Image (cartoon, coloured by chain):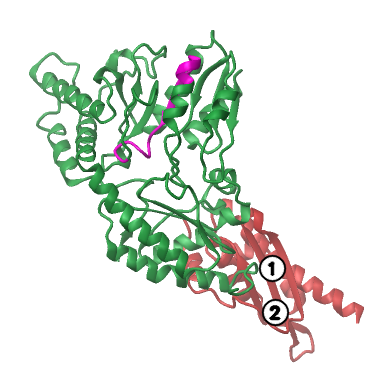
Chain colours: A green, B red
Amino acid sequence: MKIYLDHAATTAVDKEVIKAMLPYFDDKFGNASSLHQFGQEAKEALEKSRETVAKLINADPREIIFTSGGTESDNWAIKKIAFTNEDKGNHIITSRIEHHAVLESCEFLGKNGFKVTYLPVDRYGRVNPEDVKKAITKSTVLVTIMHANNEIGTIEPIEEIGKICKEKGVYFHTDAVQTVGKVPIDVKKMNVDLLSCSSHKLYGPKGVGFLYVKKGTKIAPMIHGGGHEFCLRSGTENIAGIAGFAKACELAQKNMEKWNSHEKKLRDKLVKGVLERIPESWLNGHPEKRLEGNANFCFKCIEGESLILHLDDKGVAASTGSACSTKELKPSHVLTAIGLSPVDAHGSLRLTLGKDSTEKEIDYVLGVLPGIVADLRKISPLWKGDR
Amino acid sequence: MYSEKVMEHFRNPHNLGEIKDADAIGKIGNPVCGDMMWVYIKVGKNKKGEEILEDIKVKTFGCVAAIATSSMITELAIGKTLEEAKKITRDNIARALEGLPAIKMHCSNLAADGLHKAIEEYEKRKTKV
């Protein structure tokens, strides 16, 4: 039995996506910068892909710059907006629950002459748009708030924050790695200036992503070189990856509602089943404003790494916000930001569903999980027995 | 990430639980940091009349390495005299487990310290009596 419930980490490349990629490895291997037919074939694929990807977020194709993925896009947006607009100010606003790609970029800026405000979130992980408004000063150049959180699945009020930033004339970036293809996105309606996306979260290949850069945005190139990607991100384009990414976007646009309702149905069953079967447990994140495929639990008195490796032994792939699963031995910054004690944060389990998850898989998890939790509690000095 | 031996002890930990009429308990660790151990010991005597660790049980809140080291320390220390048990180091435990990731070495520290603390508690209690 092999059950994959870690779709927020990465997804399997869809068969149709693989099919769309294959020609660009051999038959159509050209360099999109070459003038001959091989190059032009590649160029055509690149520009068609750009159109498909742009459509998914209602952007102009020229506003899509392909990158190596979400981390690069976040780094680029944050650091380069800051350095390019230094003449306007040196203040950045973000939240405490951002992905490390955002937080580390902000911390880097913090050590290089910038002031960074880390906004708190409520117990569901939501940023209050009023807090953003209050935090903006004359020297603020950028607000960066994620669209949905990768750990607890909470969806942020991006449209409201975007409106505030527009009124105040401050650049607004959102890390939408968890939402593109899952939550409808309209960059115009949401007043977003920059948006990061990664292909491998939506059944596309790894190593590809994009940064949406709104027309007129003042930003220095990510990589200097031969002038690729409108002189913003040089380097020979990864055509196979980009073609696959575009196919993944096309599939996501076509199937978004279907996949979402499928995942929501299974996720709701999973949450209900877990909370009924396991005492002293709860769901983290917002009850409604959350990604349909995300379930994040806490189980009192046990530690997450042990839990996920026992689940792995039973064939279930999951993840945790426990310190012991990370390098720095600190529990998840997201779980502590929503007010959990470090002890409780250690006992977290994230299960993220995908389009191909099945009811049988959920039933299986509901069958094995309570026993694993009970066994770990039995040997835990913190557990005082079922109350 | 983990050796086969670590996974073996994690999957089927030996002597995890508690001793109801333990002679002493060594409580160590901090759940805030993600691991905590309570080491229960039962002291008996060998044929020479020396005090030995007749039984050890451990209650552990923690990661795979914490559970495996808890199991391993009971393996290494049951039947040993108190003096021998005091000499068990974290390196002994890590070696017996065929290595631990560098970042998890503090777990083996915890297991050794927990056992030493239990013995200390026992000896303190004995001198009081």
Type of the residue with mark 1: Ile
Tell me: A130 left or right of B80: left
What is the CA distance from the residue labelled 2 to the residue labelled 1? 10 Å
* Residue at image point 26% right, 17% down: A62
Q: Neighbour class for label 1 at 10 Å: few (<14), some, many (≥20)?
A: some
In the displayed structure, A260 sits above or below A311; it is above
Q: Which residue is mark 2?
A: B80
Residues under numbered marks 2 and 1 in contact, where contact means CB atoms less than 8 Å apart:
yes
Q: Chain of mark 2?
A: B
- SS for tag 1? loop
Where is A142 relative to B56, above or below? above
Can you say whether A148 is above or below B36 in the image?
above
Q: Are marks 2 and 1 on the same chain?
A: yes
Residue A173 magenta-highlighted = yes
Residue A127: x percent and y percent? 52, 35
The stretch in magenta equals: A165-182
Q: Which residue is mark 1?
A: B88
Residue at far right of view: B128
Q: Quadrant of residue A382?
A: bottom right
Name the residue rendered at 32%, 36% in the picture.
A180
Quadrant (top left/top right/bottom left/bottom right) for the C terminus of chain A: bottom right
Q: Looking at numbered disc 2 in the image, what kind of residue is underneath it?
A: Lys
Q: Earlier in the sequence, mark 2 or mark 1?
A: 2
Q: Residue furthest top?
A: A87
Front-lying residue, A41 or A131: A131
